[in-house]
Image (cartoon, rainbow, N blue to C red):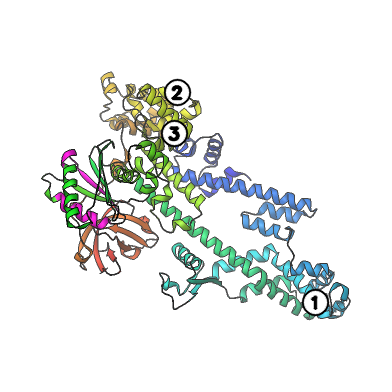
């Protein structure tokens, strides 16, 4: 297969670009490096598109590998005809290949194989021929043989029908046509396994929707309901159309005596062999597509969560709420260093609550805490009310924010946490993580397995390997788009940098501890096992603010330093301006000189020139700073305070297929259904909303008993 040609058509890019990407991937380049530093070679495709390209390339290569395997298996049976070879060459999907291979696949004992052992295959062949004047019953009488287990002509015909049914089932053409009918006309149906039993799946106790229209989240919901024993799920399909396909291909109408037998065999093939198989395929396909879409939503949400603006330079007090074991407290300075820890008991009666309040206020005053970061788990509501009440007694402004504590316990029990915070108890490490994830969500959340962060739906029902790969790709893209400080980045953060593996990351940290801070990017070359290829892949994503060379604190790759310095000379910047990294009005100067002229003079492409200019305009820039700041609060609402029609401001916490959950300062997030997000039609909430967005909402309804809040953004 000409991969570059096929992929160029699928991704609507030039064939030259497709060939370049394939060559770059095969040469061991990482996707972030290709996306950022080889734009001229692929037309400035972004990292997500290149990742999809890479996945599709792997699929096509796997397809060709399986094609060759099947060709060899059929050839070994000496059954590879020109027709079969052409069909294999033409197949575009794995299911098409498997349909072609089906007749040749070694089978376990079947009704057809038993009939063949009885010598009934010649009878089946003659019935299929449908020659005029042929009497199936008279010919069947010749196959009666007590020793072979054929007691009568009827039994012989029944055996021949089994052989014919299997041949019909093995027909790639018939299967393809029936699969298309099922995809276009099938209905996924679910009913209650026990109508008396109450469950969260009540709305699916009598549910049906066409295969081509059903939303992914409903597929995953009925699957889970079936798995938990509350639902019975099936595919419904009017058998008239599929049977007519079989009749047309099987019954030529030349012999009525054969027609009846062939039609009966076709019906048996459909009901016993084809439909159950197609039903499994369709449901598997629906589940796979639903999972892919759910993983895409998860990926989008994760990216927005990781890319939330850091709260830089602030002293943060982290609160990990709890009832029985108390509320764990950790104070960290502006760099994330632990200053103090404690355990308080705000829910253990009035005396303990008063002691806890005094302790909290003492820590806030002692360390001049700016913000309190509260985990959203068990006892979060009570802890939030407690903190909101306490900070009213502070004379200067102190804010709080509720953050997702998903994965904090996973981190606190990890080897990484034990290495970073060896002196702290496991429970106190969670409080440190909660504080730090407000200061820098990306740097802290990379320490946790992405699946544990929990910003999606049905993540436990996803293919875990595929989910892990998808989310790892998101984390990698986020880390490399922001960059990492070579002198402060944790091993977990370094591990996500393009081109670095765990051994090299450990060596970087060891080099830092032994020799002090890196003074330049070039010094990276002294790190053991960090060779030229690894340096090429990682250097542009690592920042060295302490370097004398201002380019070391930008996203300009070392391979472009010469061009960047020549550019500054052409733009008439003085040595003093270059040393101080103050490139006033660089965009205006480039425009005045002519972008194309400068690119040609420097011998670089326009995308590279644009990137150099962008980086020099804001050395050390953090792309997250351009996003809306997180919403900080000073007071808390109770669900009973909410009234229909009340207008509030909230933060989007999760975006799913049917809407978005918004934190409005109540322990329970409110749901904005997709129909209430905006006035225009949208296919998915992510077209309008993303995790971290601060939005205006109005209360539609409140149900305190069920802890349900319905919101609208349409007002």
Say which residue label 3 marks.
Answer: 37
Say which residue label 1 marks.
Answer: 157
- Please state the horizontal and vertical placement of residue 146, each as a whole percent of the image: 87, 76
Q: Quadrant of the C terminus?
A: bottom left
- Looking at this view, name the residue that lies furthest to the left: 395
Q: Residue at x 19, y 50 (%)?
A: 356
Is 11 placed left or right of 697 in the picture? Answer: right
Does dot 3 land on a helix, a strand or a loop?
Answer: helix
Q: CA distance from mark 2 to mark 3?
A: 20 Å
Q: Residue at x 53, y 44 (%)?
A: 54
Does dot 2 land on a helix, a strand or a loop?
Answer: helix
Contact between marks 1 and 2 (CB within 8 A): the answer is: no
Tag on residue 452? none
Q: Is residue 631 visible?
A: no
Q: Residue at x 25, y 56 (%)?
A: 650
Q: Residue at x 35, y 42 (%)?
A: 444
Q: Is residue 496 visible?
A: yes
Q: CA distance from mark 1 to mark 2?
A: 79 Å
Say which residue label 2 marks.
Answer: 525
Mark 2, mark 3: which one is toward the viewer?
Answer: 2
**Mark found first going from the N terminus, 2 or 3:** 3
**Mark found first going from the N terminus, 1 or 3:** 3
> Does residue 556 belong to the magenta stretch?
no
- Looking at this view, name the residue that lies furthest to the front: 351
Is 117 placed left or right of 15 in the picture? Answer: right
| Label 2 environment density (alpha carbons within 10 Å; few <14, some 14–19, many ≥20) | some
- Please state the horizontal and vertical placement of residue 692, each as a whole percent of the image: 30, 51
- Please state the horizontal and vertical placement of residue 594, each as a whole percent of the image: 34, 30
| Label 3 environment density (alpha carbons within 10 Å; few <14, some 14–19, many ≥20) | many
In the image, the segment drawn in magenta is 365-391
């Amino acid at each position: 297969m000409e991969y570059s040609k096929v992929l160029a058509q699928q991704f609507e890019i030039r064939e030259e670009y497709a060939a370049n990407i394939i060559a770059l991937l095969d040469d061991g380049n990482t996707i972030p490096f290709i996306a950022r530093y080889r734009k001229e070679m692929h037309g400035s495709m972004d990292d997500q598109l290149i990742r999809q390209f890479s996945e599709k390339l792997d699929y096509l290569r796997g397809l060709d590998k399986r094609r060759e395997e099947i060709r060899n298996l059929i050839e070994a049976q000496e059954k590879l005809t020109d027709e079969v070879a052409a069909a294999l060459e033409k197949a575009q999907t794995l299911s098409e290949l498997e349909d072609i291979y089906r007749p040749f696949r070694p089978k376990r004992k079947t009704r057809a194989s038993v009939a063949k052992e009885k010598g009934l295959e010649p009878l089946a062949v003659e019935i299929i021929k449908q020659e005029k004047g042929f009497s199936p019953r008279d010919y069947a009488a010749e196959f009666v043989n007590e020793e072979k287990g054929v007691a009568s002509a009827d039994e012989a015909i029944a055996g021949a029908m089994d052989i014919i049914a299997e041949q019909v089932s093995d027909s790639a053409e018939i299967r393809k046509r029936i699969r298309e009918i099922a995809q276009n006309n099938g209905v996924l149906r679910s009913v209650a396994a026990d109508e008396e039993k109450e469950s969260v799946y009540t709305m699916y106790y009598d549910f049906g929707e066409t295969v081509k229209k059903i939303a992914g989240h409903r597929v995953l919901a009925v699957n889970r309901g079936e798995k938990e024993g509350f639902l019975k799920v099936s595919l419904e399909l009017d058998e008239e159309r599929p049977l007519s396909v079989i009749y047309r291909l099987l019954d030529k109408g030349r012999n009525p005596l054969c027609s009846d037998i062939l039609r009966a065999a076709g019906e048996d093939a459909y009901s016993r062999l084809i439909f159950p198989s197609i039903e499994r395929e369709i449901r598997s396909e629906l589940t796979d597509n639903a999972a892919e879409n759910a993983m895409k939503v998860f990926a989008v949400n994760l990216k927005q969560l990781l890319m939330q603006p850091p709260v830089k330079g602030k002293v943060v007090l982290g609160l990990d709420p709890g009832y029985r074991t108390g509320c764990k407290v950790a104070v960290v300075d502006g760099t994330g260093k632990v200053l103090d820890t404690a355990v308080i008991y705000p829910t253990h009666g009035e005396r303990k609550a008063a002691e806890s309040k005094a302790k909290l206020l003492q820590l806030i005053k002692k360390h001049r805490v700016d913000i309190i970061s509260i985990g959203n788990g068990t006892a979060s509501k009570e802890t939030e009310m407690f903190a909101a009440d306490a900070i009213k007694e502070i004379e200067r402004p102190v804010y709080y924010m509720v953050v997702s504590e998903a994965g904090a316990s996973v981190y606190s029990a990890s080897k990484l946490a034990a290495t970073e915070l060896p002196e702290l108890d496991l429970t106190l490490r969670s409080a440190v993580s909660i504080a730090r994830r407000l200061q820098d969500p990306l740097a802290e959340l990379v320490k946790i397995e992405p699946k544990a962060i929990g910003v999606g739906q049905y993540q436990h029902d996803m293919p875990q390997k595929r989910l892990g790969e998808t989310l790892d790709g998101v984390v990698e893209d986020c880390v490399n788009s922001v960059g990492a400080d070579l002198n402060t980045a944790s091993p977990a953060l370094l591990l996500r940098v393009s081109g670095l593996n765990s051994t090299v990351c450990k060596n970087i940290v060891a080099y830092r501890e032994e020799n002090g801070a890196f003074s330049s990017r070039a010094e990276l070359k002294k790190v053991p096992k960090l060779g030229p290829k690894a340096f090429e892949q990682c250097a542009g994503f690592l920042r060295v603010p302490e370097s004398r060379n201002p380019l070391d604190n930008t996203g300009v790759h070392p391979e472009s330093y010469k061009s960047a310095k020549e550019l500054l000379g052409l733009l008439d910047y003085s040595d003093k301006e270059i040393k101080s990294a103050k490139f006033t009005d660089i965009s205006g100067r480039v425009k005045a000189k002519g972008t194309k002229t400068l690119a040609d003079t420097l011998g670089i492409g326009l995308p590279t020139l644009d990137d150099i200019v962008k980086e020099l305009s804001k050395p050390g820039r953090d792309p997250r700073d351009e996003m809306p700041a997180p919403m900080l609060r000073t007071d808390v609402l109770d669900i009973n305070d909410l009234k229909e029609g009340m207008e509030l401001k909230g933060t989007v916490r999760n975006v799913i297929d049917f809407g978005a959950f918004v934190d409005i300062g109540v322990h329970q997030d409110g749901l904005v259904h997709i129909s209430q997000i905006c006035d225009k039609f949208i296919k998915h909430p992510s077209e309008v909303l993303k995790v971290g967005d601060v939005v205006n909402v109005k209360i539609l309804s409140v149900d305190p008993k069920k802890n349900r809040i319905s919101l609208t953004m349409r007002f």
